[in-house]
Amino acid sequence: MPELMMDAPYRPAALDRADQGVLGKPLDRVDGPAKVTGAAKYAAEHAPPGLAYGAIVGAPVGAGRVTGIDASGAEAMAGVLAVIHDDPRMPAGESNSQTQASQGTDRIFHYGQPVALVVADSAEVAREAARRVRVEVEAAPGRFDQTAETPQSDHQLGFLPPIAKGDLEEALAACPVVIDRSYTTPVHFPHALEPHATVAWWEGEQLTLRTSNQIVGPGRQTVAKVLGIAPERVRLLAPFVGGGFGGKTTVGPDAILPAIAAERLGRPVKVTLPRAQTAYLVHHRSATTQRVRLGCDADGRIKAVAHESTAAQNDDSRFLEPVPFGTLPLYAGEVRHFRTDLIRLDMPATGAVRAPGEAIGSFAVEGAMDELAEQLGLDPIELRLRNEPDTDPLSGKPFSTRRLRDCYMEGAQRFGWPERVPAPGSRREGDWLIGIGMAAALRGNFTVGAEARVTLGADGRARVECDMTDIGTGTYTILAQVAGEMLGLPVDRIEVALGDSELPLTAGSGGSFGAGSAGSAVALACEDIIAELARRMNAAPEELRLKDGCVAADGREAPLAEIVRGAPIVATGKTGPGQVSRRTSQASHGAHFVEVGVHAVTGEVRVRRMVGVFDIGRVLNAKTARSQLLGGMIWGISYALQEHAVVDTRNGHFMTPDLGEYHVAVSADVPPIEIAFVEEVDDQANPVGAKGVGELGISGAGAAVAHAVYNACGVRVRDFPITPDRLLAGLPPV
């Protein structure tokens, strides 16, 4: 098995020689026809014979303990099969490979916490019976107001410890220009289109879960750990996942409870979470307060950077939003201080939602940069160019690649950024005030371990297998393109199998590391196949030319099927982080440009156009990459202007748990969006040279919208979302 840890820059030689011409091209998704015709089945659509349906009963208070459960009303209903509340394996919340939720506890960590499961022969009966279960509690005072709790600085949560490089106060005191601003962001939900759902069934001692999960390999381990069984007895299936945004990276009660019920009843059990229940049983992004301080000289060269914040978590979870993560390598400045303090709440868990850290941290640091540029009288692009570092400003490591300067310049040209930004409130078209804004984008790039198996069959077709998931990102297509380019095959001659924990292990879809890692494992496996083809043709691998299902060397040419000779060639590739991953600073970069209109009377904000230019290493598929960035940019519009989960601080209820109250951007909110790439293969990132794309588009997008709103009407909003009520008092006279 070819195994390559990234100890040095590397790109497969066969990939450089390849001339099939499919990699990078904007090919349609190979799974598209199945999805639009309904042939692609999602978790909630799986219906094996004998299926029963479960409904989760949640705690009726936000803090305290459960003293008893009266299930008699539910059990008396026709069609009810069981009310389960006495199994010690029942989880109080989500688990992942690092942290296991409390099990079999009577403590209530938050409102809606699962305390029982009703199972019935129909979903309707299960839901009604769940309403008839009476949960007896001993209520306790709860911590529901994030602004009222004292932050903890001495915590051990999260992966980003406090950083203090240099004397901050001394450096700021020495700077002639200082910006000190505070920003806030609210709770955000990862509302994926597909609901969280799992169908569980046992065959003897073997458990199978058809579930909606982004990371099935670690998920298998988590399920086994929670249930107290060997991982070999668990199989997770997630061939199609209808969006995740981080909300499906963990294993929640929607997976564990049907497994327990199916074991007890001896038949398959399905649990599908209603939209409103996901607010309590699926993690969310924490609300934050952020303070950014920038000190610079008279020319705008930054000497000191501080990004300090607070984020929340409950008593049963270990994640903490890494708010300043994107700020760490973004701008120059010798003195650098970063810290996120913890606020404990009796609320559902906070967790990783698309671009944890960068999505909301960029609002604050880019906002401070916009304000600094105004104070200095500098163009915001010029300020950023003056503070573009040559090496990582925190670690001193060289960048693997960094084309952020090019993103600024290309974006400015495409957008039509003026030589001089108009004064705030100076442009008007009828009742609309027109403004422009820009912001940088950055998302850390990670190399993670991944394996993939590739089989070149006797018919000259190939099959790619790994447990990687496709959560709407185009994984099926991208892996087919990598294999097709390496083996000289059109993508319609390649079958890709994903989302099965029995297949070779990857890190799954999350953190923007999936495509580069899994794609690299596929490329390495193909290198091994090419070596075997060369042996069979009595040629050196570098002499082979593979295209359109044929292989040629030394003037000889034959169909692949002829060379395979009825004996399929099977290879497994494996890659992961190494020394070069630790020696370099790696990230994807970009720049957003936005034009908005603000209604001079109502304060309504309309985004009129957006341009984004991005540095993502090798572009594996121009269409799917654009789609990922487009979705992130739209989400930037959404959280800048609309998204806000409101907490009832009296009891820990979410007042906006579903899409009826929690507003997200819809088609009418989306303007024309132009996306372009500044492409440079990053052979220090991974063997295929691709950097993460899925989370880059949201980073900085909301900040650019905020800056454009300020430029339009002169009202600087530092608290997301920017709703009309926050603008009306400051609008210029009509």
Image (cartoon, helix red, strand yellow):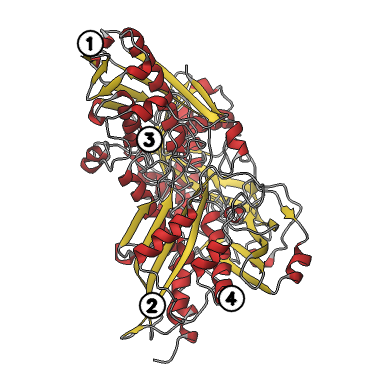
Q: Quadrant of residue 41?
A: top left
* Rendered location of residue 515, percent (x, y): 42, 37
**Mark earlier in primary sequence (3, 4):** 3
Residue under label 1: 562
Q: Alpha-carbon distance for marks 3 and 4?
A: 66 Å
Q: Residues within 10 Å of mark 2 (few under 14, many from 20)?
A: some
Q: Nearer the viewer, mark 3 or mark 4?
A: 4
Residue under label 3: 52
**Mark earlier in primary sequence (3, 2):** 3
Q: Residues within 10 Å of mark 1 (few under 14, many from 20)?
A: few
Residue under label 4: 376
Task: Tell me if label 1 and label 3 are in contact, CB under 8 Å.
Answer: no
Q: Alpha-carbon distance for marks 1 and 3?
A: 51 Å
Towards the viewer: 614 or 120: 614
Q: Is residue 48 visible?
A: no
Q: Alpha-carbon distance for marks 3 and 2?
A: 48 Å
Q: Alpha-carbon distance for marks 4 and 2?
A: 30 Å
Which element type, helix, strand or loop, lies under badge 3? Answer: strand
**Mark earlier in primary sequence (4, 1):** 4
Residue under label 2: 604
Question: Residue type at mark 2?
Answer: Glu
**Mark earlier in primary sequence (4, 2):** 4
Question: Residue type at mark 4?
Answer: Leu
Question: Residue type at mark 1?
Answer: Glu
Say whether residue 89 is left or right of residue 131. Answer: right
Question: Residue type at mark 3?
Answer: Ala
Q: Alpha-carbon distance for marks 2 and 1?
A: 66 Å
* Rendered location of residue 141, percent (x, y): 68, 61
Q: Residue furthest bottom?
A: 733
Q: Residues within 10 Å of mark 3 (few under 14, many from 20)?
A: many
**Mark earlier in primary sequence (1, 3):** 3
Towards the viewer: 188 or 702: 702
